[in-house]
């Protein structure tokens, strides 16, 4: 969206959604403002993203708006009960020439610090090793843990991409369920996702950092 406030008002008024979370996120080069709306029972979660301005390069949201010719769905999150098996199968399918291409892996330091950042009780050492092997991101909140990974844009423009998620550690009614929003929305991973998207856009030649202004004559 070019501006999330009007859309937010519509969803609150007509669909009885409420604001669940909000954040300003990005890298030193670009960013976005995000607001997450939720239905009354929080079975529907809807992040609304708008571009920030004044950075060295265009926000990825502004690039999306230009590539899409206006507002639309930037990504869709798909739940799985075993993200490790799902991602392993996705990578195998892509090696065979099918399926979806996944975003570039996070930097080495991301996995070196993963359990220290999340806390040793969040995921096991083996789960951390699988995240490292498969390029899966992890984050947590006070309810549980979110495991996530993103595809590259699925079309020929930098528009729609998919997210595969698994929410773990959420106790609801005595059973471990993937309760909507449990584990958060990956705020701790936004920087890595932004970096990967920025690099993808740069390689595609559709969004590059602005050149510094040239000094005026006589300066």
Image: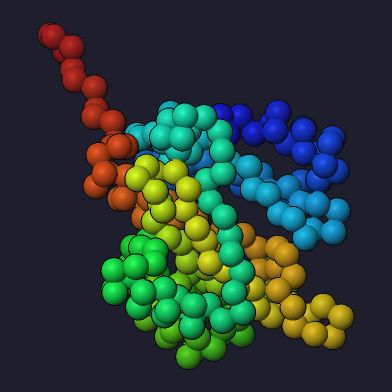
Q: Quadrant of residue 77?
A: bottom right
- In the image, residue 71 above or below residue 73: above
State the quadrant of the N terminus.
Answer: top right
Closest to the observer: 103 or 120? 103
**Residue at the extreme left:** 218
Q: Is residue 156 left or right of residue 137?
A: left
Closest to the observer: 26 or 50? 50
- In the image, residue 130 above or below residue 154: below
Q: Residue at the location (75% across, 83% down)?
A: 176
Q: Position of residue 22 (x, y in %)?
A: 66, 47
- In the image, residue 152 above or below residue 165: above
Q: Position of residue 79 (x, y in %)?
A: 61, 69
- In the image, residue 219 above or below residue 22: above
Q: Quadrant of residue 132?
A: bottom left
Q: Residue at the location (49% across, 81% down)?
A: 84
User: Is residue 95 visible to the viewer in this orientation of the structure?
Assistant: yes
Q: Position of residue 42 (x, y in %)?
A: 79, 58
Q: Is residue 76 left or right of residue 85?
A: right
């Amino acid at each position: 969206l070019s501006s999330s406030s009007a859309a937010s008002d519509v969803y609150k008024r007509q669909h009885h959604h409420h604001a669940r979370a909000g954040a300003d996120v990005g890298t030193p080069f670009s960013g976005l403002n995000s607001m997450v709306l939720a239905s009354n029972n929080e079975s529907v979660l809807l992040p609304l993203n708008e571009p920030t301005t004044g950075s060295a390069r265009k926000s990825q949201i502004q690039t999306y708006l230009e590539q899409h010719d206006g507002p639309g769905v930037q990504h869709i999150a798909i739940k799985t009960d075993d993200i490790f098996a799902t991602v392993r199968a996705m990578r195998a399918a892509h090696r065979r020439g099918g399926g979806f291409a996944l975003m570039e892996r996070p930097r080495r330091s991301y996995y070196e610090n993963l359990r220290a950042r999340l806390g040793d009780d969040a995921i096991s050492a083996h789960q951390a090793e699988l995240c490292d092997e498969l390029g899966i991101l992890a984050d947590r909140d006070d309810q549980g843990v979110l495991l996530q990974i993103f595809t590259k844009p699925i079309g020929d423009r930098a528009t729609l991409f998919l997210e595969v998620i698994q929410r773990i550690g959420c106790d609801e009614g005595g059973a471990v369920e993937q309760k909507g929003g449990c584990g958060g929305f990956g705020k701790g991973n936004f920087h890595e996702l932004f970096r990967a998207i920025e690099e993808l856009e740069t390689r595609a030649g559709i969004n590059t950092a602005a050149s510094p202004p040239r000094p005026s004559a006589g300066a």
